[in-house]
Amino acid sequence: MEQKNMNSKKKINSYLIRKILKNKYFWISLSFFIWISFFDTNSLVLHWKLEKNINQMILERDFYKKKIFLEEKILKKLKKDKTYLEKLAREKFYMKKDDEDLFVISSNKSKEEI
């Protein structure tokens, strides 16, 4: 009984598969989907790549907005505080007054000195 039932299910399944594969609308729909997905100028693959690119650009925009905000903050501080300006010039650019001597001491030892 079970064997007969299994055979009938297989026959029904194979009949449905054959019927679907012989259907011209199935093939037209499948070819349309493939065309839209891969070959069209507005393909789904292209949309996916552009969406990825947009997300990357949004991340970069946010990064640069933060960086601009920090630089503006430093610029305001430089314009207002003359001691901070002098400190930055001395530490970062090794500037000195005319009557001073400047000695730069590096904490990194080269391989030759060790």
Image (cartoon, rainbow, N blue to C red):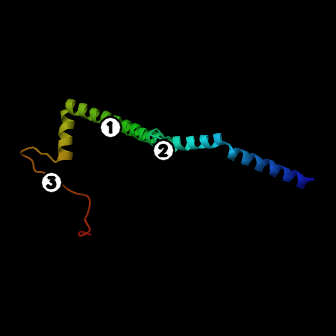
Amino acid carrying label 2: it is Phe
Per the image, label 1 sits on a secondary structure element best described as helix
Q: Position of residue 41 (x, y in %)?
A: 44, 40
Q: Going 23% across and 70% down the picture, which residue do you hit?
A: 112
Label number found at residue 67: 1
Q: Which residue is mark 3?
A: 103
| Residue count near mark 3 (Cα–Cα under 10 Å), binned few <14, some 14–19, many ≥20 | few
Earlier in the chain: of badge 3 and badge 1, it is 1
Residue situated in front as seen by the camera: 29 or 23: 23
Per the image, label 3 sits on a secondary structure element best described as loop
Label number found at residue 2: none
Q: Look at discs 2 and 3 and give the one toward the viewer.
A: 2
Q: Going 6% across and 46% down the picture, which residue do you hit?
A: 99
| Residue count near mark 2 (Cα–Cα under 10 Å), binned few <14, some 14–19, many ≥20 | few
Residue situated in front as seen by the camera: 58 or 8: 8
Residue situated in front as seen by the camera: 60 or 21: 21
* Mark 2 and mark 3: Cα distance apart in space: 67 Å
* Mark 3 and mark 1: Cα distance apart in space: 32 Å
Horizontal side of 96 relative to 12 (left or right) equals left
Q: How many marks?
A: 3
Quadrant for the C terminus, please: bottom left
Amino acid carrying label 1: it is Lys
Horizontal side of 112 relative to 49 (left or right) equals left
Amino acid carrying label 3: it is Phe
Q: Look at discs 3 and 1 and give the one toward the viewer.
A: 1
Q: Position of residue 17 (x, y in %)?
A: 73, 48
Horizontal side of 111 relative to 42 (left or right) equals left
Label number found at residue 39: 2
Per the image, label 2 sits on a secondary structure element best described as helix
Residue situated in front as seen by the camera: 114 or 44: 44
Earlier in the chain: of badge 2 and badge 1, it is 2
Q: Quadrant of residue 59?
A: top left
